[in-house]
Amino acid sequence: MSETQIKQARINKLNAIKKAGINAYPSDSQRTRAIGDVLKDFDKLAESGRKIFLVGRIRTIREHGGSTFFHFEDESGRMQAYLKRDEIGSKDYQSFLDNFDIGDFIEAKGSFFKTKKGEKTILISSFRILAKTLEPLPDKWHGLQDIEERFRKRYLDLLMNSEMRMKFNLRSKIIDSLRDFLKKEKFLEVETPMLHPIPGGALAKPFKTHHNALDADFYLRIAPELYLKRLIVGGYERVFEIGRNFRNEGMDSTHNPEFTMLELYRAYTDYKELMKFTRRMILFSLKKVLDKTEIGYQGKTIDFFGPWSTLDYGKLLEKYNISLKDSKDELISAGKRLGVNIEPNQDKWHILDDIFKKAIRPEFIQPTFVINHPIEISPLAKKLSKDESRTERFQFFVGGMELINGFSELNDPIDQKARFQEQEKTKEGGKEESHRYDADFVEALEHGLPPTAGLGLGLDRFAALLTDSHSIKEIILFPTLRPKK
């Protein structure tokens, strides 16, 4: 049968159910227990002969004359059901055969026994439909083979692939573990705006929207940083936020236009102390979620318990015959030598950053800190006292990905104003990712920001790492895709 014929057959069954005066989509159910709980206490329930209500989606149906076996499942587990004509009567038995399909939701009342093969089974004494499905589920052996179709129809991907459900369950546990750690460290969880009058907190191209009532343009936030630091000005000493950020940029295995970040700020701390804090936080999460500190990722073994490397940004570049003093043309040549496609309209610092991201970063498989980045690509970080051309900044890499960006926060309002003004010049030169001038934030700094360090952790990437997923799209429930025409 074609898909159209299958759907029409199901519609015909739906009409037959309605004609019999049965509601095919009732709003209630009489579930007594979850299937998973029944499986755990099965022997006691079978011995008692007690009848209880279970609910779930039908996944298989096997008819044998006057007996029919089917499997149905809820979120907690799957169980076999036995439908016997002599037990429920010919009329109801035939109604099941005529009107129920794989994928339908059922409520079943019955007692429990084990088959000769030892399979735990419910002997049904009564049943009713909870929801009639009109579309068939994908073939159980092949499922959804098209990767993009899996993302577009994630509900089917989750239905047909229990591994995917396990991954998303693990993602939730990862976020819970980080939240637990920060609460124990006396951090306050907060919420800051997602609509910003000025995009800020990172070097990125924003999404723009318009508020009709105010007749004003706003931007979806690219980072919560400037609002979180306002809270430190306001007297809080430890704050964090877990939420969505939006950046109007390209997509690849580690980038999605909307993504989830953990961002935190801690007063009276510098970037070196925050690096130690980072290690404690990551190890806490690993132990709580996986109960181990060594993981496999894309065929490689990553040891989090051993020493983490710390490399100076400038000295690291020297290993690739690149100097921070190189001219733009020299950096373009270096990029070609290392196989990096350079956009000619970029300034030397963004060319340098491109080379670092595309040619050097993928080599950091084991946990690695890179520190002391140039001031030109770190507009919100404090200068190094020994070298004011660079900053008290760190990035944390593992599995070839950047997981964390952090730094000692710039709290000198005069310096911050000057850097914003310098960024505005690059924006006027056509660099849309440049940081905008934020006068309100500068004024906040003028009221006093104590020594503070902060970081942002990409939760999608961290979840991809711990679930051994090759792309963050695998660990985002509904990743951004090109709309179908």
Image (cartoon, rainbow, N blue to C red):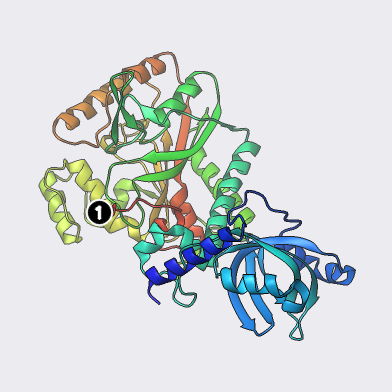
SS under mark 1: loop
Image quarter (top left, top right, bottom left or bottom right) of the N terminus: bottom left
Q: How many marks?
A: 1
Q: Tell me: residue 179, above or below residue 461.
A: above
352 or 464, nearer to the observer: 464
Q: Pointer 1: residues within 10 angstroms few (<14), some, or many (20+)?
A: few
Of 297 and 196, which appears nearest the observer? 196
Q: Residue at x 40, y 56 (%)?
A: 473
Residue pictured at 51% horizontal, 67% vertical: 161
Furthest residue in direction right, as rendered: 48
Q: What is the x, y in percent for residue 62?
A: 61, 80
Query: Horizontally, is 266 left or right of 374 in the view?
Result: right
For residue 52, what is the image quadrant?
bottom right
Amino acid residing under circle 1? Lys
Q: Which residue is mark 1?
A: 485
- Image quadrant occupied by the C terminus: bottom left
Question: 368 or 459: nearer the eye?
Answer: 459
Q: Position of residue 234 (x, y in %)?
A: 51, 18
The structure residue drawn at horizontal position 46% and vertical position 69%, both measured from the top left corner, is: 9
Please tell me in which quadrant of the rendered image residue 67 appears.
bottom right
Relative to 380, does residue 404 appear above or below in the rendering? below
Q: Is residue 295 visible?
A: no
User: Residue 447: in sight, yes or no?
Assistant: yes
Residue pictured at 46% horizontal, 53% vertical:
477
Position in image of residue 457 (x %, y %): 46, 44
Q: Position of residue 386 (x, y in %)?
A: 35, 33
